[in-house]
Amino acid sequence: MALEHAILVSLSERSASGSDLTRRFDASIGYFWTATHQQIYRVLGRMEADGWITSEAVPQPDRPTKKVYAVTDAGRAELHRWIGEPTPTEAMRSSLGVKMRAASYGDRAALLDDLRRQLDDHTKRLSLFEFMAARDFPDPSALHGRALDVYLVLRGGLLLEQFWVAWLTEYLEAHSPQPPAAPPAAPPAAPLPSSPDDQENR
């Protein structure tokens, strides 16, 4: 996928300025396709030159005029074509996974520290996705059309974060020092034999 298609998706949902798009890539669509501020503005210029989007100067009180971009008929046609195009199966490429496999050849302690940081990041993102799902989609069974599409993509992100949390947790626990085994419990003490005086007093 090219960045152009991700921008077409975002602008099809709602017209936006370059700064608006940057915020969206930081907060929503960016969880699946990242782009920097500079990349977005550079691609917007190319898309406008290709006729996929158009811009309108919108005055702002006490602020510079901003350019708001919208999708043209040509842009909608390109998005329609791209959505219908077969998508290659995406193979997993994880430098972290390769490091986990090779840990015995290097500094395992440093890698475990990095994995703890990664686990913390994925745990926070999982909590965010769970919060977004509960806030924005309290009744998924009632969804249809675009709202259902958005929910299911969020659901995919949530499941992916669950995978990372489970995998990293398993790896870290497997390499955690095992606590020493508790000593076996002592057998109960045998009762003391009673003295003759005790027997006479009974």
Image: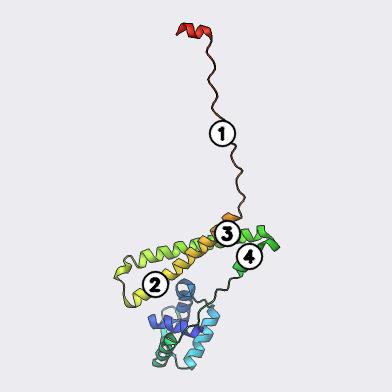
Q: Nearer the viewer, mark 1 or mark 4?
A: 1
The picture places residue 54, in percent across and down from the top left corner, at 43, 90
Q: Position of residue 147 (x, y in %)?
A: 34, 74
Residue 101 image label? 4
Asked whether 170 or 15 is in front, the reply is 170
Evaluate whether residue 14 shows in this view: no
Give the mark nearer the N terminus: 4 vs 3: 4
Above or below: residue 79 compared with residue 128: below
Which quarter shows the C terminus?
top left
On residue 36, the disc is none
Is 152 on the left-hand or right-hand side of 179?
left
Task: Classify residue 99 by image quadrant.
Answer: bottom right
Q: Residue at x 43, y 65 (%)?
A: 129
Q: Quadrant of residue 92?
A: bottom right
Q: Nearer the viewer, residue 52 or 185?
A: 185
Label 2 belongs to which residue? 152
**Percent position (x, y) of residue 13?**
38, 80
Q: Which residue is mark 1?
A: 185
Of the two numbered discs 2 and 1 in the rendering, the one whose residue sits closer to the viewer: 1
Residue for badge 3: 171
> Which dot, 3 or 2, sits closer to the camera?
3
What's the image's color scheme?
rainbow
